[in-house]
Amino acid sequence: MASKDDFIELGSSGLGKTSGFVIDEFIAELRGIRGARVYREMSDNDPVVGAMVYAIEKLILAIKWEVAPYQDGDQPVKKKDQKNADFLEECMYDMSESWSAMVSQILSFLVYGYAFCEIVYKKRVSPDSKNGEKRSKYTDGKIGWRKIALRGQETLWDWVFDANGGVRAFQQQDPYADKGLVTIPIEKGLLFRTANPRNNPEGRSILRNAYRPWKFKKTIEEIEAVGIERDLAGLPVAYVPPSMLSSAATTAEVSARNAMQDLIRRIKRNENEGVLFPLAYDEQGRELYKLTLLNSGGTRQFNTDAVVQRYDQRIAMTVLADFILLGHDKVGSFSLGASKIDLFTSAIQQIADTIADTFNDHAIPRLFKLNGLDTTRLPEIKAGEITHVDLGVLGDFVSKMTAAGAMQPDTAMDNYLRGLANLPPRSEEEGGMMAPQGMDPLMGGQQPAGAPPAGAPPAPPAGAPAGAPPADATASSPNFFEMAVQQEQQKGG
């Protein structure tokens, strides 16, 4: 028999937080709004980080999002379930911004670790309504999505937690909007996260592991830029009377010394270069002030290019995207890059599935409940598959499998292979895929005794003179599969 303790939460997640602020990150610079600004600098300023994020975003935006109706096992889809799926698809593409634009905003959770979006509903009244709360392509009076709007990560003030550490609300303080502190309950929002460590509402940025190499790389590039500038301009050195450097310097001497220090710090080679300097002599005719430039006596001891390249590689490795560096340093092989791309696309598929799961678990049930619809037979949003297929490898595999009789060719396979190659489907007049020589798809890969090889040209009609063309020599044309098999046989011959 269940006890009372079985229905209550005794422990806690251990998430570091205080007064609604999450402090679980051990590097203070990466907490809260400060962390959001650092991650934005990484994604906007670093070319390698930018390439990584761009690649992930464009791959996910290229996905075809579909709506799958509720289905009882292998039973045919019921009419009412298909109607619900059609309604959901209408809502997806009847918002004030496109579905792709909305997904693009959600993908900011890649950089920041999370994306909180507020759901704004509307009543579907008329496409001509001037009121955005009623403007829609449809006029059925149902409630749909008006927008699913991102609330900027840099505008987060704090979170509202319940007694068990669950998120109850997102509190926003936007300095550019005259709304003050706004509390958005979790029931009116969607929280997208790349990861969910300790139920942290701020998730974990995909750039978190790249922070250390990025920071070192940034420092080295800044030092390198200063070093190059100093090598070109020289190191400024100012000679002044000793009294100006003593602790007993007068107020006028201290002021002059500060002016000299500011001058040598500002010397640069640009269109505004030039120095206005005093000319003064002591009683012996020696110059009191002198400004010179010391040139570098040699080359740098460190190869900063190699150091920066090492950090670039480590940054890309953190999201399995180091294949983007292949060829830049004249290293790496195509086959190794292909295997890394497979891992990369698998990781991106999981990100797309996470977005779909958030809609299916939270947004869709609320939408159907508001419309008084059945919430026990809900349709689902599904992210299309991200595929990366090496056609050469696939063609070789299909050729060998069919030649060995382990795979039977048919029209469905032919169209599938054509789809992967972005070729048009085979027409009905052309027929489907043809079996290779020596195989009969109806005999389990074995050709009947005395029968001509499958796929061979048909025999001339009975009674026809020698050399006559086959009866249906023009009835079919070579197909994708047959050409691949013939090429494989030629290689073996």
Image (tube, helix red, strand yellow):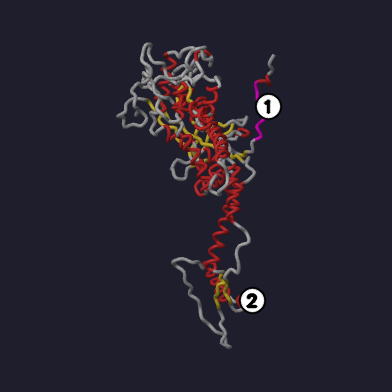
Residue labelled with disc 2: 248
Q: Rounded to the nearest whole Å, what is the CA distance between mark 2 and mark 1?
A: 70 Å
In percent of width and height, residue 241 lies at 60, 79
Main secondary structure along the magenta-highlighted residues: loop
Residue labelled with disc 1: 10
Residues drawn in magenta? 7-14
The image quarter in which residue 36 lies: top right
Q: Residue at x 41, y 21 (%)?
A: 86
Q: Are marks 2 and 1 in contact (CB under 8 Å)?
A: no
Q: Residue at x 51, y 18 (%)?
A: 439
| Residue closest to the eye, 184 or 196 | 196
Q: Quadrant of the N terminus?
A: top right
Amino acid identity at mark 1: Leu
User: Going by the image, does 446 lie left or right of 478?
Assistant: right
Please, is residue 279 above or below residue 185 in the view? below
Estimate how packed mark 2 is, as few (under 14), some (14 to 19) or many (20 or more) residues with alpha carbons within 10 Å. Answer: few
Amino acid identity at mark 2: Ala
